[in-house]
Amino acid sequence: MTRARQPARRPRDPRTVAVLFDIDGTLLDMRGAGRRSFVRTLERVFGWKDDIAYVNFAGNTDLNVLLQVARKHRRRLGPSDLRRFFARLPVELRQTAAETRLRIYPGVRRLLQRLSADPRVVLGLVTGNVEASARVKLEQFDLHNHFVLGAFGDDHADRARIARLALRRVRRHVGRGCRVGDCFLIGDTPLDISAAHRIGATAVAVATGKFSVADLRAAGADHVLSNLSRTAAVLRVLGLSGAVARDLRAGVAALRPPRPDETDGGGARPPGARRGQVVRRACRDGPRHQDGPLPPVHSNVNMRIPSAPRLC
């Protein structure tokens, strides 16, 4: 098998700005495709016919949702159950996404283009989706190549733990000789805000999901935006406005690494890629809200999926 060519690393300033994004309700709206894929997977894998109307996906994680459903069905899930479910979930998600009129929020594409062109920014994900499902969602709008790393709903059931893992991966990514300066976590729920504060990040909340500007302010967000359509305003919040404009005029966008396998459809992780290095090279090799307050995480919160098969 031919070894995939590794992209050249862009030059970095000693001080790196980490910008971590949630997906559902922040970047895009799957319009129920995520919930429907979960329902289909429950039936295919476990034989459970359950509309999971009692589950709130806002700020939740795929692992925590599955554990909540299993408790309702009085089933204790083992490692093989988790692997089977989360191997099937992105397959069903791809199908439900194809059947749904999806939506990308205003300004998202332009903002990600600006941020991924800045050599000082490490762009990552903090999402409750399992890694393969995150990729399916981002691919619907060709957003996956903007992100260089992430942490996911198959890393942990608790969003704050996922955020902490993402920050650890940022530090590992920048390596010695660089340091992570400011860290921003951008999301649409109070749980995103809480996760940001738990890791010492600045919480930037966007009211494109279930929660209003007032809700997000009350939850303690450091900055609240109605949406991401005003790129200059978002860059000011991130402390990058003037610098990004100068860098782009100087041609920093031309420094973006080549992506020879951008259209390869995924498959195996390129040699040497680490877990969580998802997305720039096809995830790098490799839900939207629903209703009401998040149900409490019970005793399985510390559970994670052991060696789940990777689909991207």
Image (spheres, grey):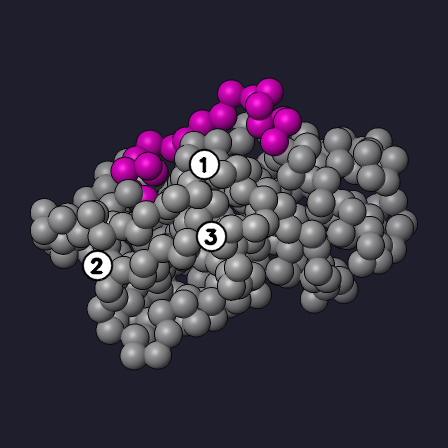
Identified at 35% across, 79% down, the residue is: 176
Report the amino acid beneath label 2.
Answer: Gly
Q: Residues within 10 Å of mark 3 (few under 14, many from 20)?
A: few
Separation of residues labelled 3 and 2 (CA atoms):
36 Å
The total of numbered circles placed on residues is 3
Mark identifier at residue 239: 2
Asked if residue 160 shows in the view, the reply is no
Dot 3 corresponds to which residue? 4
Segment tinted magenta in the rendering: 94-112
Q: Earlier in the sequence, mark 1 or mark 3?
A: 3
Report the amino acid beneath label 1.
Answer: Thr
**Residue in front for this viewpoint, 209 or 124:** 124
Separation of residues labelled 1 and 3 (CA atoms):
13 Å
Figure quadrant of residue 200 = bottom left
**Which element is circle 2 on?**
loop
Give x and y (percent) for residue 120. 25, 62
Figure quadrant of residue 16 = bottom left
Identified at 57% across, 23% down, the residue is: 98
Depth-wise, is mark 1 or mark 3 nearer the camera? 3
Dot 1 corresponds to which residue? 263
Q: Is residue 286 found inside the magenta-colored segment of the image?
A: no
Depth-wise, is mark 1 or mark 2 nearer the camera? 1
Separation of residues labelled 1 and 2 (CA atoms):
34 Å
Give x and y (percent) for residue 161. 57, 65
